[in-house]
Image (cartoon, helix red, strand yellow):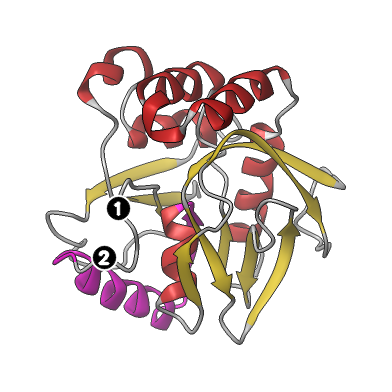
Amino acid sequence: MSLHLGILQTDHVLEEFQTAHGDYTDMFHRLFSSVDADIRFSDYDVQVAVPPDTECDAYVITGSKNSVYEDLPWIPPLVNYLKQVLADRKKIIGICFGHQLMAHYFGGQVAAAEQGWGVGVHHTDVVQTYPWMTPALSEVGLLCSHKDQVKVLPDDAELFLAGDFCPLAGFIMGDQVITVQGHPEFQKPYSNDLMDKRRSLLGEAVYQSGKQSLTEETHEGEFARWLLEFVRAS
């Protein structure tokens, strides 16, 4: 039976970029379908409403321009829904905002990073290995775009990715939750366009460093395999 992934969309790609790059749901469809063409998807705009049930095998929480600690009306229903997903023994993949959400509302803490914005390609070390890490890597390069970071992990979380810029870059919670600060769904042309759009916001030094990093190697495909292997593991 094919895997059924629910995409919990917490934001939208800017309209001016959607023709070239698609929306966040399109990005995740492309990413996971490149690894397993048989995956089925259901997409949910959780700023409008959470899904009516927990029918999917796993749920992906997307990135967002918002911060998890903002007082937004759609965040509490989403958190309550995720608690039900866990109670029903389904799995959760948290990406960027989703990574931070699973930390902040499940026992950890998120805040604006003293380091400022992280953009472009960032590399993190694999600090804990697991059987689902196939193929094995000692370091993961992913595209990033974030100004917040996880400051404190939930008590039952295990860190598996850590870097100088982002010390708490990826964690798991038991066999149900896996998160990462980076964006495996991003592709370099989209990251490039997003940095150009945000040049004044980022500041020239961060912007130039981020643009230059786009020549570096990334591991979107390998990391997507890890995510799917984690979901399929019993």
| Quadrant placement of the C terminus | bottom right
**Disc number placed over residue 70 in the picture, else none:** 2
Q: Are marks 1 and 2 in contact (CB under 8 Å)?
A: yes
Give residue 153's quadrant in the image. bottom right
Above or below for 162 versus 83: above
Above or below for 157 versus 115: below
Q: Secondary structure at mark 1?
A: loop
Task: Residue at 30% x, 46% y: name it.
Answer: 42
Position of residue 30 in the picture relative to residue 144 (left or right): left
Give residue 112's quadrant in the image. bottom left
Q: Where residue 85 sits: x, y (%)?
A: 37, 73
Let me know if residue 90 appears in the view.
no
Cα separation, mark 1 vs mark 2, equals 7 Å
The residue under label 1 is which amino acid type?
A: Asn
**Disc number placed over residue 90 in the picture, else none:** none
Q: Where residue 34 sits: x, y (%)?
A: 57, 28
Let me know if residue 24 appears in the view.
yes
Above or below for 119 versus 182: above
Reading the image, the residue beneath label 1 is 66
Task: Residue at 50% x, 50% y: name it.
Answer: 1
The residue under label 2 is which amino acid type?
A: Glu
Q: Which residues are magenta?
A: 72-96
Q: Looking at this rendering, what residue extends furthest in the front direction?
A: 204
Q: Secondary structure at mark 2?
A: loop
Q: Where residue 106 sits: x, y (%)?
A: 45, 81
